[in-house]
Amino acid sequence: MFFMDRRDAGRRLAARLKHLKGSDVVVLGLPRGGVPVAAEAAKALGAPLDVCLVRKLGVPFQPELGMGAIGEGGVRVINEEVVRTARVTPDELAGVEARERVVLESRARRYRGGREPAPLTGRTALVVDDGVATGSTARAACRIVRARGAARVVLAVPVAPHDWTARLGADADELVCPHTPRNFYAIGQFYSDFSQTDDDEVVACLEEALARPVSTRRPPPGHAVPEDREADVRAGALVLRGQLTVPEGAIGVVVFAHGSGSSRHSPRNRFVAAGLNRAGLGTLLFDLLTEEEEIDRANVFDTDLLARRLTDATGWLREQPEARGLAVGYFGASTGAAAALWAAAEPDARVAAVVSRGGRPDLAGPRLPAVTAATLLIVGGHDRLVLGLNREAQARLRCENRLAVVPGATHLFEEPGTLEKVTDLARDWFTDHMVPAHHGAARH
C-alpha cells in the first residue's frame, strides 16, 4: 500500500503539484472518492475547490464493467470495444445513460446546494481522482472541463497503472501521478483505508473549502517555506533524492533509513511517515544510495557507508530553514536500522530517539553500547530469527531502550493492523523523547 486514506493521498499528491501554486487554477474532484483527495490539493495550493460530475456507464448485466462515462454539459465518452465485446445494444446504452443522467443532475444539486459551477473559462482546471483504473471516467472529466472553457487541463491522481499516460495523454495537457506500479489490479489495493466516501463527506469538503480564503498570488521569495517538498539531500559530494515534510509547529524531524532493496518510495516507511506527520512530527525520506551504487549489492549491506550517508543527511537537514533548531530522530527498517544505530553512536550525533522496525541492530555490532539516544526496537512476533537478533542486540544497549513485539506480524508487517501498530508505537516513542536539538547532546 502507498496511502493510509484519501486525505493522506491528497497531501502526498499535493507535493507534486506545487508548480501550480499561484496560478489561476481551479481544483475539481471526481465524486465521490476523488473529492477528499482534491480537497487536500486545493488546500495546499490555496485554490478553489469544485466537483467535476461524471457518471460511469456500466454494462447492464455487469455494472462494475465500464463501457463509458457521461458528464455535465452533455459530454459522453464511450468505449466502443467494451460495447462491442459485451454486445450492448443502442437501446440498452441509451437506457443506462438516461438513468445515470438523472443521478448526475441530482448530485449536482446535492453537492453545490444551488451554487453555480466554478467558472473555468481561461483558467487551469486541475482534475483530481483517488486513482485511475480503466481511465474512462478521467477521460470524460478532462473533456468536460475542456468543453467548459478551461485553457489548460491537468489530470492528477495518487496512483495509476504504469501505462496510464498512453491511455490518457491526449485528453490532458499535463499528467501527474507519484505512483505507477506495474502490479496494478485495483485502486483500493494501494490504500489502507479505502472505505466508501458518502455524499455528506463530499458536501463537507466543499463547504470547508468555501470557508477558506483563496490565495491567487505566490508568496514573496524567502517569505514562506513549503511544508512538504522534494529535496536534494547533500551527502558529501553526492546529491541524494529525498522528500522533506515539516508540519507547522513540528516538535522534531524523523529521518528514515530504508532497508536493503528499498528506497525513499518504500510504501511501509511512507505509511509510518504519514502517521508521524499527523502527530506533528516532520519527516525526511531519502535514498541512501545512488542508482549506480545500488547495482553493487555489497553497498546495500555496508553499514558503515549507510551510516555515513545518514550522518551527512542529518547535517544537511539541520541547515534547512524549516528544520533549524528542531530535534532529530531516526527511524530505521531492516538494514537501515543498523545504519541508524551506527550513526546515533557518533559522539556528536545529537539524536533524540531511534526506532527500529524489523531491524538488524546486530549489524551495528560494537557500536551499540555507545548509543545514547532512547531506542525502541519493534519486531513482529512471527519474525523469530530477527526477534532473537534484536534480543541479543538489546542486551548490548546502555541507553534507555525497549523491545516491542507486535503479535501476529511477520518481517514486513503485511498482516492487517500490524503496520498501524508500528506507526502508533513509533509516534508515541518519538513524541515522548523529542527534545530541542541544542539539548540533544546532554540526553542519556
Image (spheres, rainbow, N blue to C red):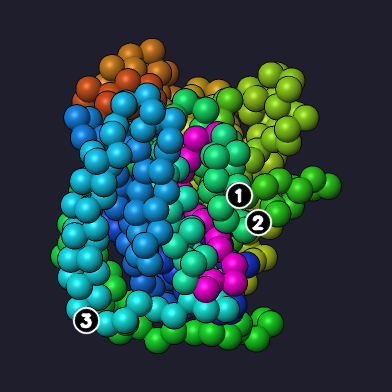
* Badge 2 vs badge 1, beta-carbon distance below 8 Å: no
User: Does residue 35 belong to the magenta stretch?
Assistant: no
* Amino acid at pointer 2: Ala
Q: Specify the label residue 402 is tagged with.
A: none
Crowding near pointer 3: few (<14 within 10 Å), some, many (20+)? Answer: few
Q: Where is mark 2, residue-wise?
A: 231
Amino acid of disc 3: Gly
Classify residue 199 as left or right of residue 10. left
Q: Residues within 10 Å of mark 2 (few under 14, many from 20)?
A: some
Dominant SS of magenta comes to loop
**Circle 2 SS class:** strand
Front residue of 22 and 64: 64
Picture disc at residue 114:
3
Q: Earlier in the sequence, mark 2 or mark 3?
A: 3
Q: Which residue is the extreme one toward the top?
A: 385
> Which residue: 61% across, 56% down?
174
Q: In the rendered view, does 345 fall on the left or right side of 42?
A: right
